[in-house]
Amino acid sequence: MLEHLTSDVRLLARSVRDGTRPVPVAGLTPGEAVRVRRGRSVLEARIVDRFDAWALRDQCRDRVTEALRDAGIAHVQLDAVREEPHRVVVASSDIEALRATLSVLGTERRLHLARITSRGAGPARALPRLPGIRSGDVLRVFSPQVSVTGRLLPTMALGVDIEIWERIRTSRASPDGRMLPAGSLVAPRTNPRTRTLTPQELAAAQADRRGQSPPLEQVTFPVDVVYTWVDSSDPAWRADFDARRAGDSLAGSHASAWSPARFTSREELRYSLRSLVAHANWVRRIHVVTSGQVPHWLDTSHPQINVVRHDEIFPDPDDLPTFNSHAIEACLHRIPGLSEHYVYFNDDVFLARPLRPEDFFGAGGDIRYFPSRIPVDDELPSDVDLPVVSAFKNGRRVIERHFARRPMTRPRHTPHPQHRGVIEEIERAEPELVARTRRARFRSATDISLAAQLQSSWAAATGRGVATDTSYEFIDIWSPDVDARINRLLLRDDVDFYCLNETWIDPEQCETADARVARVLTMLLPFASPFETDVRSEPR
C-alpha cells in the first residue's frame, strides 16, 4: 500500500513538473489564453480544439524564418531529421538585429522562448521578455497550447531552435582539419548536418535549399495505416454472427472465440483516428477494413479514407462471412492500392504523443516491432489456450521450422508495422497454413497471427525487422485496478501508445465500462478529425 502511495506521490510531483495536470478551462473558448505552470515556467497557452503536432512545428519554423527574412538577417534552416525541433542558424554578428526581430515577433503573445542548455530547457517566457543573448546560445521559440479539456499539449518540443553560431574574425583550423576562412560560422552544439559554414557555404545554403538531399536515416517512402473494425450492435451483422455460430461446429473451441468483448464498439475508431491526425500527419492513406459496415460518423469521401470490404480482399468467397480477426489479418496485404509499408492498428490502440515514420520503420524499409516480456511457452497449441496464444505458438513453430530460431515472447498490443513483401513471402512459403487461418470463421487453435506476430518474426529472421522497445500502457477496462491505472495514464506524458482493451463483458456493468473509455478518450483526444461528418465528440 505504501509503495503504491509513494508511486502516486511521485507521479503527482512529476505531473506538476511536466504540466500534465489539467488546468481549469470552463467558460473559455478556443483561441483564448490560459496560464499553465510547467516546472519553473508559467506559460500563456492558447486553448485549441484542433491539434496537428508536426504542422505546428513547421508553423513555428516558418514564423521565425519569415521574421528573419523581413529583417534582412542572414540565416540557414536545418530542418529536423526526426522528432527534434527544427533549427535556424544565425551569426553571432547579428545578435542585436536578432534581439530587435524577436521583440517585434513578441507582439504575437502566443510565442514563448526558452534557453536550451546541455541540461535541457530553462524557464520559458512569453515574448517579448527576452533574456540576454550571446554567441553560442540556443533559443527555442514555441507556441504553447492547451486542449479544450485543459491538458497542456507537447508544444515545447514542437518549436524551432535559433542557434547563435560564432562568426570567427580570423582563419581557424576546423575539427575536420581544413582551414576555415575569416567570417565562417562555428556551431555551438552538434547537429546531423554540419559543424561549420564558410561564407561561401552560407551564401549557397541561403540561395538554394532545393538541392539538399534527405538524410540517409529518414524514411522517404509512403506509409499507410490499416484498421480492422466491427460493430456488433448492427442487427444485420448480429444475425449473421448468430446464424454462423449456430451452424458451425465449435466443439472444443475456446469461449473467447465468440465473446462479445471482441466485437463491441465504443467508437474507439473515431478516437484512434484523432490520435493519427494529432500525432502522425505523415500517414498517406487510411484503410478501414469491415464486413461492409461503415461507422455512421466516418466521412468516406475524404481522400485519405478507404473503406475496404472483406469480399475485396479474401481470395475465396466461401470463407465469408468471418468473425475471426486472425483470418482478416491474413488478408490485409491484399488491399488494392496499399503501400508496401503500412502500420496495422486495432481500433482500441491509440498514439499518445507525436511520433515519426522512423519510430515504425528504418529508412531502408526494415520494420520496428515491439515484443513484450511475456514468453510463448513450449507446449503445443490446444483448445484450452486462448486462441491468440495458440496462434503465437503456431507462429513460433513456423519460424523454428524455417530458420531453426525461436521467437521468445509475445507481441505487445501496439500498432504493428508491416512490410507487404514479407507477408507475401510467408504466404508463398506456407500457403496451406495461411489458407487454413482464412477458412476459420471463428478463432481457432490452428490459426496463425500473421500481422501481429508471424510477420515481424519472419522479418527479424531474414534481416528485415528489428526488435524495438517502446513506452506503452495496456489497460483492461474490466480489471480491478483499472481506475487507478487510468488516473496514472492521464497524468503521464512519456507514453508512445496505449490500448483500452477488454477481455470479457459484464452485461450489468456496460455503462461503467463506457464511462471508463470516455474518461480517457475525451480527456486525451478532444480534437475532432477531418474524417468526422458529425460534431459529436463523446463516445456513446
Image (cartoon, grey):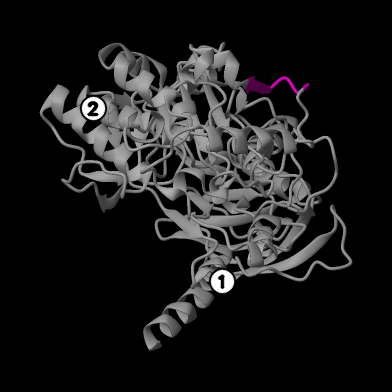
**Label 2 residue SS:** loop
- Where is residue 286, by image quadrant? top right
Can you give x and y, in whole percent of width and height, for residue 335 in the image?
54, 16
Report the amino acid beneath label 2.
Answer: Gly
Which residue is the site of mark 1? Answer: 483
Q: Which residue is drawn at the image coordinates 27% and 43% (left, top)?
A: 382
The answer to whether residue 169 shows anywhere in this view is: no
The disc at residue 269 is: none
Residue 360, compared with residue 212, is above or below; it is below
Q: Badge 1, how many Cα within 10 Å: few under 14, some, many 20+?
A: some
> SS for tag 1?
helix
C-alpha separation, residue under disc 1 versus residue under disc 2: 60 Å
Is any atom of residue 191 visible in this view?
Answer: yes
Instruction: Residue 244: give x, y in percent of width and height.
Output: 56, 32
Q: Residues within 10 Å of mark 2 (few under 14, many from 20)?
A: few
Place of residue 499 in the rendered image (x, y in percent of width and height, measured from the top left): 51, 51
Mark sitting earlier along the chain (1/2): 2
Up/down of 430 relative to 512, above or below: above
Per the rendered image, the range of residues in magenta is 301-308
* Residue toward you, 305 or 277: 305
Tell me which amino acid carries mark 1.
Asp
Quarter of the N terminus within the rendering:
bottom left
Task: Using the image as rendered, state which of residue 528 and residue 210 is in the foreground.
Answer: 528
Q: Is residue 509 above or below residue 227?
A: below
Residue under numbered circle 2: 177
Percent x, y for residue 126? 71, 59
